[in-house]
Image (cartoon, grey):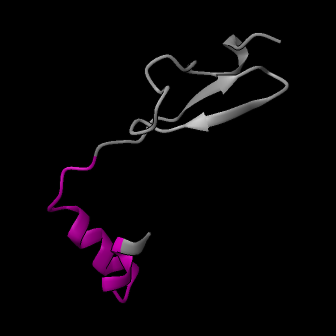
């Protein structure tokens, strides 16, 4: 979000985005279905984390 501070309008953001390659951030889940948390690609444990909460143990 901090990167958006330099723009005054949404149109400016959209125009700037056309000039950049954006990669999606795909969060994953660690823990159990009852006690879990989200991890992001740059965090420890991301590679071992589940893609969806339904695949976690109860």
Q: Please provide percent x and percent y for residue 26.
A: 45, 35
Q: Nearer the viewer, residue 44 or 17?
A: 44
If the image is split into quadrants, where does the N terminus sit? Answer: bottom left
Q: Is residue 27 left or right of residue 16?
A: right
Question: Which quadrant would residue 54 be assigned to in this image?
Answer: top right
Q: Please provide percent x and percent y for residue 46.
A: 47, 27
Instruction: State whether the magenta stretch is mostly helix, strand or loop.
Output: helix
Q: Please provide percent x and percent y for residue 29.
A: 62, 27
Q: Residue at x 33, y 78 (%)?
A: 11
Q: Residue at x 32, y 84 (%)?
A: 7
Placement of 51 over or under 43, stated as above or below? above
Question: Which quadrant would residue 2 be assigned to in this image?
Answer: bottom left
Placement of 15 over or under 54, stated as above or below? below
Q: Nearer the viewer, residue 4 or 18?
A: 4
Q: Please provide percent x and percent y for residue 58.
A: 83, 12
Magenta stretch: includes residue 10? yes
Q: Is residue 56 left or right of residue 6?
A: right
Placement of 7 over or under 49, stated as above or below? below
Q: Residue furthest front?
A: 44
Question: Which quadrant would residue 41 be assigned to in this image?
Answer: top left
The range drawn in magenta is 3-22
């Amino acid at each position: 979000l901090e990167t958006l501070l330099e723009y005054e309008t949404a149109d400016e953001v959209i125009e700037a985005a056309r000039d950049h390659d954006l990669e999606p951030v795909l969060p994953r889940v660690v823990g159990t279905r009852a006690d879990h948390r989200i991890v992001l690609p740059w965090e420890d444990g991301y590679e071992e984390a589940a893609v969806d909460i339904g695949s976690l143990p109860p």
